[in-house]
Image (cartoon, coloured by chain):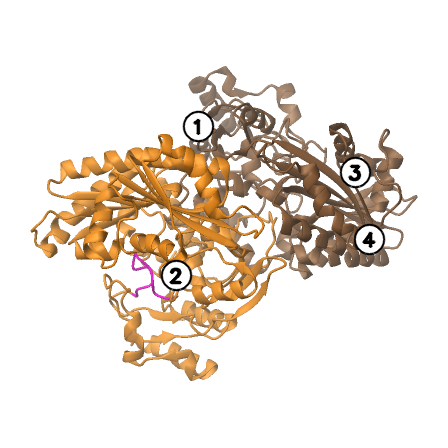
Chain colours: A brown, B orange
Amino acid sequence: MTPVQNQLVETVLQRFGPKAATTDAEAIAPWLSDWRGRCHGEAPALLSPGSTEEVAAIVGLAAEAGVPLVPQGGNTGMVGGATPPADGSALLVSLRRMNRIRALSPVSNLAVAEGGVILADLRAAAEDAGRRFPMDLGARGSATIGGLVSTNAGGTQVLRFGTMRSLVAGVEAVLPDGSIHNGIAALKKDNRGYDLNQLLIGAEGTLGIVTAATLRLVPGIAARAVAWVGVESPAKALDLLRMLEGGTNAVESFEILPEKTLELVLRHVPGTRRPLATAHDWHVLIEAVTTDPAAEAPAALLERLLAPALAGLAGDAVIAASEAQAEDFWRIRHSISEAERAGGPALQHDISVPVEDMPRFMVEGGAEVEARFPGTEAVAYGHLGDGNVHFHVRAPRGVDPQAWYAEDGPRISRHVHDMVVAAGGSISAEHGIGQMKRDELARLSAPSRMTALRAIKAALDPHNILNPGKLVTLAPDAARP
Amino acid sequence: MTPVQNQLVETVLQRFGPKAATTDAEAIAPWLSDWRGRCHGEAPALLSPGSTEEVAAIVGLAAEAGVPLVPQGGNTGMVGGATPPADGSALLVSLRRMNRIRALSPVSNLAVAEGGVILADLRAAAEDAGRRFPMDLGARGSATIGGLVSTNAGGTQVLRFGTMRSLVAGVEAVLPDGSIHNGIAALKKDNRGYDLNQLLIGAEGTLGIVTAATLRLVPGIAARAVAWVGVESPAKALDLLRMLEGGTNAVESFEILPEKTLELVLRHVPGTRRPLATAHDWHVLIEAVTTDPAAEAPAALLERLLAPALAGLAGDAVIAASEAQAEDFWRIRHSISEAERAGGPALQHDISVPVEDMPRFMVEGGAEVEARFPGTEAVAYGHLGDGNVHFHVRAPRGVDPQAWYAEDGPRISRHVHDMVVAAGGSISAEHGIGQMKRDELARLSAPSRMTALRAIKAALDPHNILNPGKLVTLAPDAARP
């Protein structure tokens, strides 16, 4: 720890008490790596402010002293965005103590949650009030509101409710100069100049530390139904989605996977079994939800809407007869990562293209990668209705994993990203940029776009205090204008 | 015209032909004032590029030569945001020639419209395809897509579909350095760093010229019904809205007005008549729309949902028996401005507060203004469900209008804005800042917020080329860092 860092920590301890900072290596250790173990860093101290005012004071002190800070939520990110730099130059700031739900109203359908509130806790609180916070993802037991806002998180309910950006009605944040941005009021209409809330959403903690957010709630679930449908192609799957959307707005999930991925799951995940009697080239998992107890039951709705699809769009279809069977269907979807790990080395790409173009991309893009990199197997599965799939490339059988990741991996990923950019798509649909995709972002963006991103960062964080090196790098001389 | 301006115009004419620029004073004159005649400016030339590439070239030339540009859409703004400065230092850039709808798909429910497309034309094109572009406002025959995006326009369908921000799926714009920002692809998920599209929406042409946008469409209207309800207070009106929302999502408009405003309309606008037999303190206009021809008819729906309200929430209610009667109800709402003009001088404030707080604000805020400025009459009407009302203060009888506007006007408006800020609200809910609210924005915003806005402007437009003096001013030395 440098003397300057040490002084900052001492000041924080003096002003805000022993809970506000620790230099205990054991307490800090879990927060130095991302949960997948891909990124590692060092930090001599972990600061844990207890209020927005304490965050503001800490950022103000850090700005004055020139000590960088790395904000951290639940540390469940996918791109190393919350992992500190390796040189120990930055201190960690955790919002775990700021875990209060300040307000929750089933009348206005809004909740105000502090940055450290865990997603599952907010969902439970909403449910207790007869409402729902319609964002869900695997890390719900750890991911926090501050991180979800700062990464514009996606998840499995985007089809109907959008990403975090659509769910945020207000943001409170501490800016890099230590001032508090108070944009927490839920104003449905507000045209007072550049929208700082929108700028902070998805900024990965590089422009501000999100200390609280006002979040939209939706009606609680009255009933749900889950269907499994076999189709011959992603194009047919998308036609099926459009047909369903023509008849209802109850479809909340529409996930696609290829037969080979289903087979991988059946092979590696005990207790899973094929939902339909026969094989199909592609499979779709559909969930429909109703919120009005008097509305047509979602199972009946899906049965009515899927029946005509069996004449051409769909090869076969089954609606889960029980909640247990519905869970079995979902278990297949959620076990894909586990099955892939068991299946050998694979490169993962979280990509999006315009929805209508995704069926073509899945088929042609997969074939192109397999042809160009012999022995690989490309599989695309996920959120077809969002134009977002996980495009994974599995290593040829028998390769040495370490060597393949080190040598072929970057080449293959660059090729996948090039295909995505050529299709007008995004190399990060929901995971963000962090440190893992930073150089690819710079390589693939128009120079004027990178200039604009750097200019914004330098304008709002001229001393490069907040999460330096994530998302964009500033030229060394630009960091001190 | 300065020699530098002259050379720029000559270059544009040479490169892009005679349609691309004019210096004809008569042709320029209509665009030098805002449509309400509140702001006047000068411009020695009007540039009319025919393509995004021509806009980019013009901005590039202007940046090089240091000639400011004022982008203009339909010139229907309310805050002088498109009026050039008085000193003739800037050239006007009109996108009127860029009026092509590049694509419109009823399958993906997206349209790509150039900046100069007129709102009414886009709405008509969507209707021809069996869809709807769900934004509507009085200026629909003149307002253009570029201006609607750049001002994050509101209108009468915000309750269900949100402001322009919610309807924009992609933005193409020319940035202040003359580069083209290509964010036009409709990606439902895209987390590649700071969201420049969001930053450009509502930036009033100060950060870029919006040359095209990808816009969301919704299903076409199958049927509509319009109801008029008398209530005793804004609080009851909001309770009524919440009750309706509990039973349907078909309510698209929910407009409130006080009895004295209704009386003003009945007195001054020929052919209007009271929808209900008796007077009520407050009135609500409700429109419900269905898009599924098989769904319950909206008139029956409103009748079913309003019936229980008559037991307490509502004093009386009537559902328009014909389309003509529905138009009569709407005519009252749309005639308020006309009636107010006939009723004498009035100050208009376009304000928002959190929705649940609006009933209190309307009643207490109105009483406070009337007490503080004796003889005035404060009326609030408009989009209650959006937390946005037009809060108008009418002059005492018999005052000299000019003197009242000049002397009392600013004091009263400052007081109204102070009340709004105290309530956590916005002094510009849907009209923007432009030049008319620029100083009030600076007066009422936290200093750190103004610092951030200026830093963003200076970072992206370091030479202050685009729409200078609108929204924020830069200190003279900040304009050339």
User: Are the residues tagged 3 and 1 within 8 Å (C-beta)?
Assistant: no
Q: Which residues are magenta?
A: B74-84
Could you say whether the residue bearing mark 1 is in a helix, strand or loop?
helix
Q: Is residue B210 magenta?
A: no
Q: Nearer the viewer, mark 3 or mark 1?
A: 3
* CA separation in Å, label 1 and label 4: 53 Å
- Which chain is mark 1 on? A
Three-letter residue code for mark 2:
His
Three-letter residue code for mark 3:
Ile
Count residues near mark 3 (Cα–Cα under 10 Å), then give few for <14, some for 14-19, many for 20+.
many
Could you say whether the residue bearing mark 2 is in a helix, strand or loop?
loop
- Which chain is mark 2 on? B
The secondary structure that most of the magenta stretch takes on is loop
Three-letter residue code for mark 1:
Thr
Q: Earlier in the sequence, mark 3 or mark 4?
A: 4
User: Are the residues tagged 2 and 3 within 8 Å (C-beta)?
Assistant: no
Q: Nearer the viewer, mark 1 or mark 4?
A: 4
* CA separation in Å, label 3 and label 4: 20 Å
| Residue receiving disc 4 | A232
| Residue receiving disc 2 | B463
Could you say whether the residue bearing mark 3 is in a helix, strand or loop?
helix
